[in-house]
Image (cartoon, helix red, strand yellow):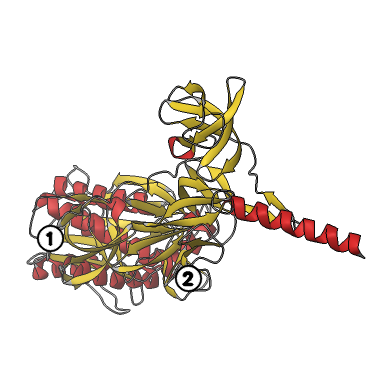
Amino acid sequence: MNETKSSWSLKLLLSSSLAISGAAIVPFQLDSSGIQSTVVEAASTYTTTANLNLRLSAATWSPVLLTIPSGSSVTYISTYGSWYKVSYGGKTGYVSSQYVTVSNTSAYYKTTDRLNMRLTAASWSDVVTVIPADATVKYVSRYGSWYKVTFNGKTGYVASAYLTATSAPVPPSDYYKTTANLNLRLSAASWSSVVTTIPSGATVKYVSRYGSWYKVTYNGKTGYVSSDYLTATTAPITPSAYYETTVNLNMRLSAASWSNVLTVIPAGSVVKYVSRYDSWYKVTYNGKTGYVASEYLKPTTVTTPTDTDGTGKTVVIDAGHGGNDPGAVYGSVYEKVIALDIAKRLAGVLSSTYDYNVKLTRSNDTYLSLDQRVSLNKSYKGDVFVSLHANSSVYNTAHGHEVLVPTSDSYTTNPYVSASRSLGSSINKEIASRISTIQNRGVKYQNVYVVGRNVSPSTLVEYGFISNSSDRSHLTSTTYRQRMAEATASGIHQFMRSYY
């Protein structure tokens, strides 16, 4: 009993004296027996920041073993207060820790989990902020197993066990392009409320970074998006105030190729820029506002949008046949019906899109002689005359669209032969460029009464063969008829712009 008590007293005395003698300068902890053990960090390499004395013990009065040149690498062994025990050049001793820096520590680290940044290097210290997983932090210095780092403008300490070395972050671009439809969220979290959805290919402006989330602005709204779906891009080009269309261009109700067409803007027209929605521009034209594909626009210095190009000009549209003259027939398919339907559609496009004064030789199922049709053109004082038809043949293989223009022989009395040919060519070109599913038979010289005996630039359009199954499927399609009407209107307009 006395021996046990004596051993216990000795152990307590030894433990107490060790703790007291080293408390001020040596980190310690009690093992399971109660004996102090020094906390030894894993060996790593340090670099001296000045010429540094390697001393025999951890004290400024201790003998100098040698002087280590600035920039030298030393191997870390342990910590003794503000002194590091290191080895260098085959010798082991102590150096002041304030003149060395960890050389095998990365300048940047990535967090492997959500990580508390603390005010001091202790787990009980106040939390400065919470750093999200996968965030990049910048290394400042080391204090045992704690790293002093900076993140989003804040500096503090984090547990190094939750860091992995990484390369320096790529400096953020000012602008990014989305690689998918992307939710703009209220905060940097996948469960956060969605502010809006940014379409794929849109350009956003970078504001700041929060881990793998970027704070960006888009269309006047600011929020967070996942950086995984962004790629750096250049700043968007400052839009011009006015643009010229390079092709006949659909103005749509919304910024989508499937949206309703408000009107067709002719090639060479000037539109006024309103705003941008990715690759679509919101523009105004002829009193209408809608969206057009920006790839078919080019900046212009013209400051007055094109409008009312057709003001003062009269276009006479002649729907072929009618009444007791059905024209070509195939079963229940009648040429006179097709011609009248396209004529009405053409009249609508010419008046609404181009603002022409349009006259129809017939607006219902009425018979008119060829001479009556020419006489109506005279009375209407038409600037152009276009007769609409569908073709037919005893050979069901014959197919395609074509345009008929006046010949140069004695049959022709029309004083506008050259202009009529230009008109026909313009219409044929537009139809061929817009509708590739039907063969282009070209422009043909032929003696046709309403063309050769007229008194203004005149042409006749054959939209396809009723006798051919493929052409017939087009001619009976309302979609095809509308496309033919739009192409014909564009051809007429192109001619009018160049001729008058």
Q: Nearer the viewer, residue 372 or 314?
A: 314
- Looking at the image, residue 83 sits to the left or right of residue 223; the answer is right
Reading the image, the residue beneath label 1 is 306
**What residue lies at 15% left-to-right and 45% top-to-bottom?**
418
Q: Badge 2 local density, few (<14 within 10 Å), some, or many (20+)?
A: some
- Looking at the image, residue 462 sits to the left or right of residue 241; the answer is right
Label for residue 375? none
Q: Is residue 216 above or below residue 24?
A: below
Q: Quadrant of the N terminus?
A: bottom right
Q: Quadrant of the C terminus?
A: bottom left
The first of marks 2 and 1 along the sequence is: 1
Q: Position of residue 449 (x, y in %)?
A: 23, 57
Q: Secondary structure at mark 2?
A: strand
Count every numbered label the image shows and give the total. Answer: 2
- Looking at the image, residue 194 sits to the left or right of residue 271; the answer is right
**What residue lies at 39% left-to-right and 65% top-to-bottom?**
256
Q: CA distance from mark 2 to mark 1?
A: 40 Å
Q: Badge 1 local density, few (<14 within 10 Å), some, or many (20+)?
A: some
Q: Nearer the viewer, residue 32 or 279?
A: 32
Q: Nearer the viewer, residue 375 or 176?
A: 176
Q: Amino acid at mark 2?
A: Val
- Looking at the image, residue 230 sits to the left or right of residue 425; the answer is right
Reading the image, the residue beneath label 2 is 333
Q: Secondary structure at mark 1?
A: loop
Q: Is residue 36 visible?
A: yes
Q: Position of residue 346 (x, y in %)?
A: 28, 67
Q: Amino acid at mark 1?
A: Thr
Q: Is residue 457 visible?
A: no
Q: Position of residue 426 (x, y in %)?
A: 24, 50
